[in-house]
Every structure is written in C-alpha cells, then in structure tokens.
Amino acid sequence: MGKKFEYKNIRFDFKGRGITQEINLLDIDGKRVKGWYTNTEEVPTLPVLLNAAGSDGWELVSHSVNQDNQANGVTFHYLYFKREVA
C-alpha cells in the first residue's frame, strides 16, 4: 500500500512591508487564528510559524502570493504543507 498524506493550508499577510517578518493576519485551514498551537498566542513571525509546523512534522510543499493592490492593498501569502499519515 502506498503512502498516505494529510494537508494543511495557511494564508497570511505581513505587518507593514514584511521586513521584520511579523504576521498581521493568519488563517490556518480556513480559520482565523493567532498562532500555531492555540488561539491565545500572539500572532508570530514567519520563522516561528515555520519552525512550529516543522516540529509537528509538516513539510512545506508550495508557496504562492496574491497581491491585491486595487481593493485593499493586502498581499496574501499561501503556504501548503503535507505530512505522512502513520
């Protein structure tokens, strides 16, 4: 039997121009959250978020960007992760 995987998607935008990599808005699997582990955490920086995902066994497989300059000036980043189901 072949390997089986589960998937997770993350959508976020940076505070300001993203120089400090602080995350402004964070959605995980379609739900607005404040952090990787609980909703009571402060919204993390991108390195903190990626390290938390990696520690839980998630592998980043794709990243895309959607820049909405016309409507509200928000640039959303989309991250897609997978991990093997035991």
Image (cartoon, rainbow, N blue to C red):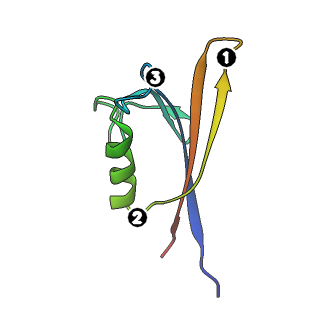
For the residues labelled 2 and 1, the Cα–Cα distance comes to 35 Å
In percent of width and height, residue 59 lies at: 48, 62
Picture quadrant of residue 73: top right
- Crowdedness near tag 3: few (<14), some (14–19) or many (≥20) residues, C-alpha within 10 Å: few
**Closer to the N terminus: mark 3 or mark 2?**
3
Disc 1: which residue: 69
- The label nearer to you, 2 versus 1, is 1
**Closer to the N terminus: mark 3 or mark 1?**
3
Type of the residue with mark 2: Gly
For the residues labelled 3 and 2, the Cα–Cα distance comes to 29 Å
In percent of width and height, residue 29 lies at: 55, 42
Nearest the viewer among 18 and 86 is 18
**Which residue lies most toward the left here?**
41
**Which residue lies most toward the bottom here?**
1
- Crowdedness near tag 2: few (<14), some (14–19) or many (≥20) residues, C-alpha within 10 Å: few
In the rendered image, the quadrant that contains the N terminus is: bottom right
